[in-house]
Each structure stands twice: as structure tokens, then as C-alpha cells.
Amino acid sequence: MRFLLSTLSLSYATRNKAKTFLTLLGVVVGVATFSAIRGAQSTLVGGIRSTVDRMAGKAQLQIAMEGGVPEELTETIRELPGIRSQSPVIEQVVVPERGELGSILVLGVDLLGDREMRDYSFEGDDADLDDPLLFLAQPDSVAVARPLAKRAGLKIGDPLVLKTSRGLRTVKVRGLMTPKGFAEAFGGNLIVMDVFAAQDLFARGRRFDRVEVRLADGTTLEEGTRTIEKAVGPAYRVETPDRRGAQLEKLITNFVAGFNISSGFALGIGTFLIFNSFAVAVNRRRRDIGTLRSLGATPRQVMLLFLVEAAVLGLVGGVLGLLAGASMSQSFLKLMEQTSEQVFGIINASEAHIDGTLAVQSVLLGLFASLVGAWEPSRAASRIPPTEAFAKGSFQAKRGPLSKPRVIGGLALFGAAIAFTFRPPFGGNPLILMVMGLCVASVAMLASPASQALIDRVAPFAARISPVAGRLAADSLMANPRRTSGTVIATTISIGFVLGLGGYMGSTKASMLRWMHDVLTSDLYVRASANFTNPDSRFPASFREELAALSGVRSVESYRGMRITVDGEPAMLGTIEVPLMMKRVKHDFLQGNDESMLRGLSERGEVGVSDNFHRLHRAGVGDKVTIATPSGTVSFPIAAVFRDYTNDRGTIFMDRSVFLRYWKDDRVDTYDVNLISGADIGKVRDEIRVLVGGRMPALISTKREFVSEIGKAVDAFYSLVRITVFLALGVAFLGIVTSLLISVAERTREIGILKALGAVRAQIARSVALEGVALAVVGYVLSLPIGLLIAYFMETTVAEVFAGWRMPHQTPWGLLTELAIALPLVSALAAFVPARPAARTKVTEAIEYE
Amino acid sequence: MLRLTDVSKIYEGKSQVKALTGVSFAIESGEMVAVMGPSGSGKSTLLNLMGGLDVPTAGSVEVAGRDLAKEDEESRSLFRRTHVSYIFQAYHLMPTLTAAQNVALPLHIAGVPRKEVDERVDRALQEVGLGARDRHLPDELSGGERQRVAIARALVTGAALLLADEPTGNLDTVRGAEILALLRSIHERGSATIVMVTHDPSAASACDRRLEIRDGRLVGDNRN
Amino acid sequence: MNRQGAGVVVLAFLAAVPTARAEDARKLLVESEARHRTKSQQYAGDLTVVAKDGKVRKKAWRSWREGYAGDAKLLIRFHAPPEVKGVSFLSLGRPGKGPDQWLYLPSMKRERRIATQDRDASFVGTDFNYEDMEEFDQSKFAVSLKGDETADGQVCWLIEARPEENAGKSLYEKKLLWLRKDILFGVRQDVFRKGEKEPAKRLHLSDVQQVEGHWVAKALEMTDLKKGSRTTILLQELAFDRPQPAGRFTLQNLNREGGED
């Protein structure tokens, strides 16, 4: 056996480099995508935790509240027993004017009192602080981590311009820090400044983002937490850095979950490319198999030979894929980080790395995928009767097993996929894998008979287009059902996934746009911060009167959002003047109605919840939502459930008056300004600009601008899904190209015979191209049911499991059209390119080929 | 050595093809037999049955005392390793292996130790007069040389039954005669039983006995 | 464990006659305190920090003190260079505990409390830390006489002072004090961090002379023996026992920018 592998297989591989390469490419692409996505994903998740950990330094507990911790809190905690030290922190990611430096994390700490928390020193060898008194006395002082300083070419005394919510602000480098411990957080793209200066720079008012606490020796975390919780009340979160990291991770669960699907998909397609390559290889090496058998090789030996070949390819491909994946994962990570920052306000910056476990996993997956892909072809190879192996053409001409059980089995699997889609028996990743697996399996079983049936219809049509080339293509397609179905399966599965994911994204975007159109009906939106979910600046409540006093303004609503926790799960709290809002917004109610909502929220202090909150928390009208407020824990009855896409973890709405009563925090995120009909929007906007002028940061958008800005945030959330779709498309094309390339190479002999029979080169090339087109069309048609099922599955089942949403289905006409054009073109090209040299081979050589 | 009793072979397909009908004969150990007949007469089918590459639809094929018709694929393969060797018209050499590697192939399949393999391959190649060309690929050899490699491959296992399917069919007269002479000398030197399918009368005349097949039936059995 | 308030402000120690060691040391210190105690002290200070690499930073402040040792109240206002003008420091002694300390930053228009845990931090980039800024209060130390030794050509009592556990936490394990025998005036201090055998820092008081009838060292130099940097303070315009306006040593006054003292 070893000889067979080391000589027969190896010599085969080295003498058929191109084909081996293509087979390998399948594994490489699959494993690379898998490892890149998983690497970036785990680095992101791990990075968030390590950033939180690093930044926390020696702090054991963190006290935080949505909207910030008031300064007075530090006095409350100061004399508590068991507290060794405390230190306020402000954390803000900013983009410098020199964008090439990337986002920078600004950490505001109490420079007079932070040494207990974090290991650093601005003195000695660790750092170089020009003059500590000067640093403190001047609020624009920052200390820059050395790697950043080096990259930016910054020295002591240099200015650095930052983009803040208050516009461009210049800070001055008055110290350098050596990255160790917390200075390594955020990839070392860190600057430190005084926390009070940071309050001003980032418009935090007299609040901190959190207060960090170190406990006295002998005080346990539980004791410390209890003492502080008792002193500060339920509205504050008192948690360990680790728990905070875990909470942040929870926020991005949905975002991250999408990547599991993507990486699974990549691997699936990789497996299929391998299946196809091996199926073709078995076909091609039939005669050799026959020879081996006649020399006494047992069927098992033959199967083993192919499987071991697959294993070797899988391992090599796995390793190569891993290398490729490692280099890709950094760019994936950048993208994920941007999104997690933009959409969730979670900061992180790390170097993507693929750890040992993932590396082993990737290589093993490459191996596993290869074995799975090669299993069936290898078995087929071992079953080739030696006598038939020598009979030229008889195998290719033989129809695939069009057995009834197979068709029925395939249909049953597809039926099961549909059943799981509509009535999921369980949730999470297993469900996704299950449905995807069922789809793939059913395609594998049905594609061959279905493609034969289709080709029998499409082929004569091709013959009508072009009498000679079309006829040749048609003959070739119908005469080689085995070769054909491999290509068709690859196309079907790939395009099915593209349609599924793409369709899902389309539906999601469309429903969100429709919803925004229904809900965002004010004329102007005045925001304090560009960040929707995690605003870094807010308006004073008094500003509303000033806005309302402007001529042309009919009414002003004050929206305030807040991230809260309900039953340990993150959720969003939205507050506004409900009566005003109800006048202009038409809600799509699942439970309750306009009347119950208006009454409940504005008169009875109840809440309305979004449809996804309703599904995620299984709470509807008649139930209560328990929320920890600064005035104690309160249970709010639910007055209505309506469709809402504010937050993927669910949203609770309450009237502003109720919020003020319990939270005693009157700051506002966004003022929704409604104008008198006929008022000049541009003029009012200018007046608001004048009103704001330098006093506070403000972004003033019209309805349309506001919708498009939110749309951008939504896009960012789906940016990786979109990349996955492109990737799927790439893999789909690769699958088509690979199988066509192999199939053309296979046909060198046939082409020789055609030439011997007088076909000219152009005719041959054209016929091969036409064949590619026909295959693409068949694959496309077959992918439609799969794609639509997957799309529906994502829109309802998956979206509901993860975000509690059910997106109304929207047929992705645009995508369908694009694919209908692109697919045949690519296929024709993929077939045409290798067909030309094949058509150029001399007749005698071509016939000798086998 | 070899006994076929009332062997029939029918290929099922769109239409039924009767390849062999009620064929019975016996070949003694050490005989060199030619099976003759026109194209499609069923002589290749006969050869496949004798080597256990295929099983009859009816009847029994006894080789070295075993009825191959009753054995499964696996055991027939194992049987082939030690008892039967094939020589094909189209040589069926592995195009990516050198002459020596091709010859070594059946020994490796049978799991013969490496050292012994080298030795036996050398001997077999010497025997067919190709000692100097052992490192060449099939593409670099002439037709006659390729067939010699195939013969060496058949000899190397020391199988008692050597089945040749038109061994001279792809060769010109001179090369064909050389191959026949080679087979003849192998037959005379050793004790191998050789069955050769051919429609070349001169090839048949090199044999001790000649079986004639027509339309799937045995129509003649003559000794030279 | 020892808390030495020598710091920036003038300190003085006095000695009596040596007998039983602990008792003698205590007597010497009590006598020293009694002899040098003033109701108030004020001066203009010139501060020079010389880093190991020779880099020199200079600052100037005015200092007012009321009370003495454990009950001292201290206010310092910087007036040069212009970038730090108005930065102020207020320390209010609390009997039996560590003092309350605040730093006022005019750019932020607010005071910042110096947390107890931060007294190890450098006082505005000097070789003094916040603990060094406290007045030496012998009542918070266990003291013992270690013999006599010459310092700066003067015969001195050598006294070891270890901070009492219940007198608030200290950065130091012990201090060695050199008290001139003739006038019971402290001229040198070595401070030892916890667990260290070698002194971390050394304070020298020189240019000792009488002003308005009180002994005072007009030059202080703190050397950080580890880092190799040193900080000197030269005292000018010294005056003692001037009546201090009511409210000078309060947070309200601290926050009054450039408060006229």
C-alpha cells in the first residue's frame, strides 16, 4: 500500500499538476475561509475580553450605569468598608484627523489616583512624562503609547488632532508610555489622559463611564459586590471585568453567529469541490483501476488508495488553507471590529491570530472534508468491475443511478429541511447545521436525476441555437450524465447558498427600510452623538424648549435610548413623549392597538415592547417586565407588542415622564422635530445650527438623511454576511470553473475524435462554451428552490431564534437577475479557456491521450 | 488446471447480449492454448471468466481446484494475485510509473517485502530482455517494449496461469513475432499454463492447442 | 510605617539628654517640637527638580502653614512657570489619622482629592510624594535612640522612627532622623520603604539659620537614591507667626482661582 501511494499516487499527482492543484484548491478555499472567519471571530471575542481585562488592570469590580456614573458616587464609595481603592474611568474611541493611524482608544483616568489600578508610571524607564505638574495643569495633555507614537511620528510636545463629538480637538503629547499590561489593550493604539480633562473633551458632563474598585485584602468579591450594591442601589451594575466582558460578548452574539454559518458554508463547498474532483478523477483513472484490479488488487485496496490520496490532499490543503486563512483573517477582523464598534460601541483592536486549537481544527476539517468528499467516488471506484473499466466510454455513457429510492430519499430530505424550517424542533447552530446539511444532502441526491431530466430538455434547445456547436454540446451533455451532474451539483449548492443569504439580507433590509419609513416621520432629527447604540454625548433636557420656540416648529419629542438588562439578557429601553409620537407614527401591532398603547404608556405607566422582545422573552400583553431603575426594581405591565427593528436583542418603550420618574436622568439622545406644514426645512435647520452653535455637539439630519444613516449602520451589521455572499459567489464560480476545467481536460480524447471527424477549432471551443452555459442554466434553475428555502429559513427561523424577528419574505429579484446574467458568462468563460488549447492538440496526440 | 463446465454469460442491458453459451473445456497444467475467433465471438469474455475478472451467468469456472463462479469479488482478487496474470493488447501500463515500477505493482499489491520485490522485478525484466530500460516511462518505450514490460509484470508474480488478450494485436509483424517467441520461451522454460486470445493464425500456431469460438459457442478444439 | 513630615515644609527636631533609649528619643522629639513650634509659617519657595539625565525643571510657589506637626494646615500655590500658575495644594491635618489632601487645577476649575492610596505618587513631579508632604508628627511613631553620629559636620542624635500601626497607613517601614545636638534641629532624614534594607530617599536640610528668632533650614534637598534624581527647595521671604486670614485653609478658598492666599 505504501508503494502504491508513494509511487502510483504521487507520480499521478506530479504528472497531473493542474488537476491536482484544482482539487487542492477546493480544500484550500474551504479551510482558508473557515479558519480566517473563525480566527477573526475568536480573536474578536477574545479581544473584547482581553481589552476589558487589560484595561481593568488590578481593578476587581467595576461600577457602571447606563448614561454614566455621576461624580458624587465616588464619595459614596470612598469610605465603604473593604474598599482598598477606587478610580473613575472614561473610555472613548476616537478617530484622529490622520485617519491612517486607525481608531485610538482614549482612556481617561484619575492620574492622581490610578496607580493602584493599573501598572504604569510616567517616570523612569517605563515612560517619559515631560512634567507631571504641567501634564495635570493643562487639560489638553495626553500620554501616548509608544507604538502609536512611533507610527505617528509623535514626540513630546507635538499636537495630535482628534475627531470628537464636539468637532476637531487638538491634544498635546506630554508623555509617552511603554506598552505593558494595560497599555497593550486596544492593540497599543492607546492614549491616556486625565479623567476630568476627558469629561470635558468627550462631553460627559460631570459623569464617568465607570468607577473601578480594588478591594482590601481579605474582602471577597461577593462581599465587596454586596457592600457596593447596597450603597449605590439597583440601577448600577457592579460587576467583575470578566463579567463585563461576557456581557459585551453577549451583545454581539447575533453578529458573531452569522459567521458560523459562513464558515460552515465555505467548508461545505470545499467538500463539494473535492467530491467533484474525485468523482472526475475516478472516472479518468478508470482504466488504471481496472489494471490494478486485474493485477489482484481488492476493491477495498482500491477504495483505500483513493481515500488515502484524499487524506493526503486534505492534510496538505488543510495546511495551505490554514496559512491562507491566517493571512486573510486580519482583514476580516478589521471589518468585524469596525462593525462591533460602530454598531455596538464595543471597542477592540487586536492582531488576528489563529490559535493552536483552531489550527488543528482547520487541518482536521480539511482532512475530514476531503474524506467525506472522496468517500462516494472512492467507493464507486472500488466497485468498478475490472472488465468494464477497460471498455472505453461505457462508464461515462452509463446513466447515474436513477433509482427510485434515491429520488424518494432526496425528496424526503428536502421535505425534512422544509419541515425543520417551518417547525424547528430545536434552535441555535445545530438547527442551522441540520437544515443546511439536509439541503446539501438532498441536492446531492436529487441533482443528478433532476439535471438529467433538465438537460434532456435544455440540450435540444442548445442544438437549435447553433446547428453544429449546439448539437455537439447537446450530445456531449446528454452522453455524459455523470460528468454533468457533478458540475450541476456544485453550481446548485453554491448558488443556492448565495440566493439564500443574499435573499435574506435583501428581505431584512427591505423590512427595516419599510419600518423606518413608518416610524421615522419627523422632519428633522437633532442628535447629540453619531453613535446610535452607545452615544458619547447627550443634550440637556432644557434644549427642547429652545427648539420648540423656533418659528416653524410644531412639536419636539425627546428620545432617550438606554441599554438595560432584562432577566440577565441585554435589551434596549427607548423613551419618548408617547402621546406626541403616537400622533405621527403608525405601528404594526401584534398585540394591543393604538388605543391601548397610548393609554397604557402615557396614563398608566406601562410599557410597549417590540415584536422581537416579545418572542425572545416570551412576554406579551398581560405580562410584566422587571427593570432595575435607579429608584429600585420596578415591574412594568406590557400594554402592546408591535413590530420594531430598533435593537436585535429587543426593545422596551416607555413614556418619557415615566422614565424621568424612575431614572431621574433627563438628558436626551435625539430631538425629533416636527414642523408646521409648509415650513422651510432648510431654514429651520439653519436656525437650529445657530442655536447649537458651539454650545454642544449636534448632528442635524432630515428624515431622508437620518434613514440613510441608520441604513448605513444596518449595512455595517450585515457587512460580513455580504462578504460571505460574495465569498459564496466566488466559491460557486470556483466550483463551476473547476468542474468545467476538469471536464474539458477529460475530453481531450473526444475533442481529438471530433477533430478527426472534421470539426474546426472554433466549433469545438464554441460547443464547449455552450455546454458550460447549459450547465450553468441547469444549476441555476435547480438552485432556485434551495435558495428560496434557505432565504425563508434565515428570515424566519434563524432570525427568530437569534433576534426574535420574523422578516417578511421578499424575493431577491435583483440578485436573481444578476446571477442569471453572470452565471452563464462565467461558465462559458470557464469552459472556453481550457477548450481552446484542447482544441489545438493534434488529432493523433489527443486520441493517444488515454 | 482449468475446467469450464457449461459456462454461459449473458450481458443485461437495453437488449440482452448472449456472449457465451454452454461452453465446456479443460486445460491441463503446462499447456499453451490459443483461443481464436472473430471479433465479438466471446473470446475476451472467456478470458475474463478464466481470470475471475468476471463471473459466468451460469456454469462453473474451476481454476486450480476453485470454482471462481462461487467466490466473491474480494476472494477472487486475492486468488488473482497469486494464481493468474494478465497480458493485454493495449498493455495497460500505468502511464505515470516507470517500467520497473509497473512490473513491481502486483507484488506491492500482494504486500511482498521490498527487498524481494526489487530482486524479482530485476529478474523479470532480464527475462523479457529489458534490464536496461527499467527507469523509462511507458511513453518513452516502443510498442514492443511496452508489451515486454507487461509480460514481465505478468511473470513477476510467478502465477501458474498466464492469460493474454491479443498480446500482438497492437504490434507490427516483426515485433509481434518477437513477443510470441518470448511467450513461447517462457512457456518452455517454466511450467506456466498460457491461454492466449488471438485472431492471428500465426500467433495461434505458436501454441500447443487451439480452441475456436464462434457466436459464443465452442466450435473447435485442435492440437497442433 | 513611618511617617515623616519633614518634607517641603521646614522641620525641626530637638533633643534632651539621652537616658533610656526609647524614652530618651521621645523626650528629644517632644522637646524639639516644643522648641521649634510656631503658630504659622509662610515663605516663597523656589523648586528645582534635577532628573538623573541632568534635565532641570524649575517652579515657584508660595506656602502658608498654620499649626504644627499633627495639626498643621498647609496651602501651597504655584505661580511660575505660567503654565502651572494657580495650581494649588491644600493639606489639612487630622489628629490621629492621615491628613486630607486636595490638589486644585485652575484649568478644570475644580479641586481633586488625593486618595489615601495615592500618597505614594510623586507630588507634582518632584522627588517628594504626598506622604512626604505631611508634617512629621512624632506622636504617630514609635521612636528609639540609636546613638549619635555626625551629619554635615554637626554632632547629631540618630533616632529611628517606625510608624504606629493605628496612625494611618504609611509607605515607609522606618525613618532615620539626624537631630543636631546643639539646637535639637533635624538636618537629615533617610526613609526606608517596606522590606528594603537600603534607604529609598534622603532629605538634607541645610543653610540652617535663625529667622525672626526661629531656627529654620533655608535649603532642602530630597534625593531619590534609586532614581538618581533630586529636588531642591530654597525658602525665601520667610515669616513666622503672622495671623492667617480666616478661611485660608478651606476648600472654598482653594477653589478661588489665584486666591490671594
Image: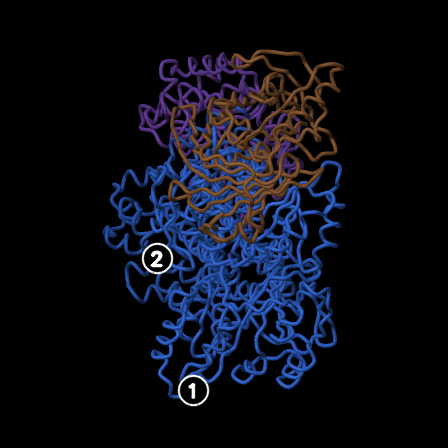
**Residue under label 2:** A473
Give percent across and percent down for residue A169.
Answer: 38, 53
Give percent across and percent down for residue C55.
Answer: 38, 28
Colour style of the rendered protein structure: by chain
**Quick one: label 1 or label 2, which is nearer the N terminus?**
2
Name above or below for residue C95 compared with residue A197: above
Give percent across and percent down for residue A7.
Answer: 46, 25
> Quick check: do tags 1 and 2 share a chain?
yes
- Per the model, the C-alpha gap separating discs 1 and 2 is 69 Å
Q: Please name the amino acid that badge 2 sits on.
A: Ala
Q: Chain C rendered in what hue?
A: brown
Q: Tell which subunit mark 2 falls on.
A: A
Numbered circle sitting on residue A676 = 1
In the figure, the blue chain has which letter? A
- Mark 1 is surrounded, within 10 Å at the Cα level, by few (under 14), some (14 to 19) or many (20 or more) other residues, namely few
Answer with left or right where residue A835 lies relative to residue A673: left
Q: Secondary structure at mark 2?
A: helix
